Image: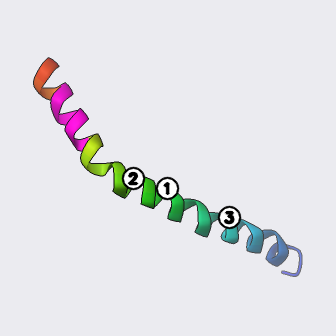
Amino acid sequence: MAKTEPELTPERGRKKREPGLAGLVLLSNLPLLIAVVAWLLWRYG
């Protein structure tokens, strides 16, 4: 237990920060991604 706790805490800290940044990037670019996917489907679909 004592060994696993110090290993998990830095991972949790990293996991909390990374999805936050990734989430902001995805939310800010979501309309653009949808537009690109829709255009590709219309173009080649």
**Range drawn in magenta:** 34-40
What whole-number distance in Å separates the C-alpha atoms at marks 1 and 3? 12 Å
Q: Is residue 39 magenta?
A: yes
> Where residue 5 sits: x, y (%)?
80, 78
Image vertical order of residue 42 relative to residue 20, above or below: above
Residue annotated with mark 1: 22
Residue that extends furthest to the bottom in the rendered view of this protein: 2
Residue annotated with mark 2: 26
Relative side of 23 to 16, left or right: left
Q: Dot 3: what SS?
A: helix
Quadrant placement of the C terminus? top left
> Where residue 19 sits: x, y (%)?
53, 61
**Which quarter of the figure has residue 34?**
top left
Q: Residue at x 76, y 69 (%)?
A: 10
Q: Is residue 28 visible?
A: yes
Q: Residue at x 16, y 35 (%)?
A: 38
What whole-number distance in Å separates the C-alpha atoms at marks 1 and 2? 6 Å
Contact (Cβ within 8 Å) of mark 1 with mark 3: no
Relative side of 21 to 3, left or right: left
Q: Dot 2: what SS?
A: helix
Q: How many marks?
A: 3
